[in-house]
Amino acid sequence: MGGQFTPTNFTDVPGLELASLSKERRNRVLLRLNMEVCPCGCNSSVAACLVSHTACARCKDRAKEIIAEER
């Protein structure tokens, strides 16, 4: 869907429960959400897709996987 992937710098992603994570783990999750390309093919970061494409199930699933991996 065009263009080169550019990482993002979101510090708050609506719809994700990150408050229960330690500051270190929360920062690691946010880093990964901003640096990883969304698997839906939009060529955005997972974080950007979560913010811009709220109906995208693939970014939500990937975000949940990242959070689980960092717990």
Image (cartoon, grey):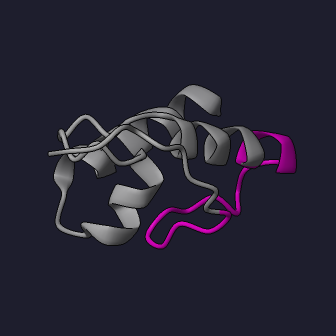
Query: Where does the image place residue 69, in percent across and percent down from the top left?
Result: 55, 26
Residue that sits furthest to the front in the current view: 3
The residue sitting at 84% across, 41% down in the picture is: 24
The residue sitting at 48% across, 44% down in the picture is: 6
Query: Where does the image place residue 68, in percent across and percent down from the top left?
Result: 51, 34
What segment is highlighted magenta in the picture?
11-26
From the viewer's perspective, is 2 left or right of 49? left
User: Residue 21, relative to residue 18: is it above or below?
Assistant: above
Residue that sits furthest to the right in the current view: 23
The residue sitting at 73% across, 50% down in the picture is: 21
Query: Where does the image place residue 52, in percent across and percent down from the top left?
Result: 32, 70
Is 7 a magenta residue?
no
Quadrant in which the C terminus appears: top right
Residue that sits furthest to the top in the current view: 69
Query: Where does the image place residue 34, in percent across and percent down from the top left?
Result: 55, 46
From the viewer's perspective, is 56 left or right of 60? left
From the viewer's perspective, is 8 left or right of 62? right
The residue sitting at 55% across, 62% down in the picture is: 17
Front position in the image: 4 or 52: 4
Is 22 a magenta residue?
yes
Most common SS among magenta residues:
loop
Asked where in the image residue 58 lies, by quadrant, the reply is top left
Asked where in the image residue 19 lies, by quadrant, the reply is bottom right
